[in-house]
Image (cartoon, grey):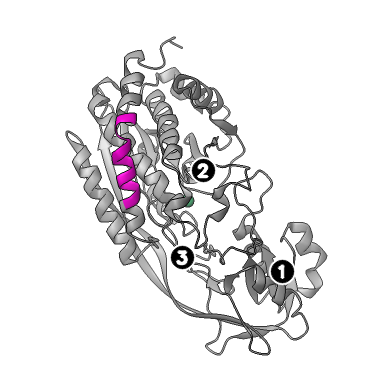
Amino acid sequence: MTARTVDPDGLEPLLQRVADGLPGLLADFNAICDCGGRVAGSDSERRARDLTLGRLAEIAGAGRAWLEPVDYAGWQPGSCSLSLADGTPLACQPLLGSASTPPAGLVAGVVDLGRGTDDDFQRAAARIPGRIALVRHEFPFSPDHVHRRRKYDAARAAGAAGFVIAHTDPLASPTSGSSGRNGGDGIPAVATDHAGSARLATADASGARLVVQGTDQPAVGQTPMLDLPGRDPDDARRVVLSAHLDGHPLAQSAMDNASGLAVALALARAVAPQMAQAALGLRVCLFTAEEWALAGSRQWLAMMTPAERSRLVIDINLDTVGADPRLTALTSGFAGLDAFVAASARAAGQPIGLHRPLMPNSDHANFAAHGIPALRLIAGFDQPASRVRHILTAQDTRDQVAPAELAGAARASASLLWRALCATDADVSSWR
Ligand SMILES: [Zn+2]
C-alpha cells in the first residue's frame, strides 16, 4: 500500500469551501423543508426533486445531472381510524403501504405485546391469532433496537389480524413509517400515540375497531443523480454519495432527511472544483422511496450488471445528520471501514463514532447487500434523549436541527468523501 492515501493539498481547501458554503447549505435545508414532508409520489416530493435536480445541474459543469427512473410499489392512503368498541376515537396514522381492512373496518380484541421483542411475541403466541397486535415504537438508532418491520413481520407470522405501533412519549404524535408490505400480502398496520396505547392496552375483551383503506399503485419514482469524473475520465469507478429525498407526511422531514440532502448538495458543490485531483469519480444519488422499505436504491442496484456494481467502490450515505452534534458511522459489517472512518475523523478534527454491525435502516444497506462497502453517517446514534427521538413524528421540523450540527456533519462527511475520492487500489481493497 502506498503511504499517501489522501491528497494533502485537497482536504484543507475542501474543508474551507465547505465552511464558506454554510449559508448555501442552510438555504438548501430550509428550501427542502419548505417543500413539506416529501412522501414519495406526492407534489411535495416532486417540488423537492425539482429543487435538488436544479442544484445538481448547477454543480454539474463537466459532469452531468439527470433523473434516474425507478419502479416501486406505490400506495395512496384513504380513510384511517382507530376506536374503542364504544366508539371512543384514538389517534391513528396509517403505516405507508398498509394492507386495507374491509370498508366497515376490522373489529377484534387487542393483545398488548409491550415492546414487541421476539420474547414478547413468544410469550403471547396463543392469544395473538385473530387479534390486533399492539407494540411500542422505540428509539430506532441504538444497538439493541427492534425494528418496526420486524415486529410487524412477527405479528403477521403469529396470525395477528392487525398491527398497531404506539409512541411511548406522551407528547409525541403517532409515527409514520413503512409497513414493508411492498404491494404484497400483509395485515392492516397503523400507529397511535401514547394515550391511544393506554386505552388499547385495557381493551382486550371489548376490542377495537380499525379502519384503514389504501390503494396499491405501481409507481415510477425519479432519483436525481450527478456524475462527476475524477482525474482520469476513462476510469468508470465511482464513490457514491447518497441521501434520500423522500420523507413522511406529518411534518417537514427535516432531520430525516432534509439534513442529509442539504449536506450532500453542499459537499457536491464544494468538491466539484477539485475533482481533477481526485483518483476516483463521484456519483451523487438522491434516492426516492427510501421510506418504502429502501425500495428505490434496492431497485437501482438490482438493475445493474455485476460489472457495473463492481465500479461502485463505496457508498457514503447521509441520513439524519442533524438534531444532535454526535456523529456515528454505521459501517455495515465492513471491518476495513473502521480505519477509514477513524483517519477521516482525525484529519477533519471532527469525532465520528463507529458502529460496525449492519443496520438495515437506510440506503447504505442495499449497497452492503451487494458486497459494496457502505456506511451511514447519522447523528444521535444510541442517544435516545437527543432530538433525533422526534424522527417519524409531527415533531420532525427544522427547528430540531441546529446550523452548527449541519456544519459539523458537513465537515465530517467532507473528510470521508475526500479520503474515498483519493483512495488507492490498495485502499479500495482494504475496505472490502
Ligand atoms: Zn432516513
| Earlier residue among tags 1 and 3 | 1
Relative to 214, is 87 on the left or the right?
Answer: right
Rendered position, 427 above or below 220: above
Viewer-closest of 13 and 122: 13
Other residues around mark 1 within 10 Å, as few (<14) / some (14–19) / many (≥20): many
| Earlier residue among tags 2 and 1 | 1
Q: Which mark is residue 27?
A: none
Disc 3 target residue: 250
Other residues around mark 3 within 10 Å, as few (<14) / some (14–19) / many (≥20): many
Q: Amino acid at mark 1?
A: Ala
Coordinates of residue 388 in the picture (x, y in percent): 55, 49
Q: Which mark is residue 369?
A: 2
Of labels 3 and 2, the one closer to you: 3
- Determine the residue positioned at 63% across, 63% down: 167
Q: Amino acid at mark 3?
A: Leu
- Determine the residue positioned at 60% across, 63% down: 171
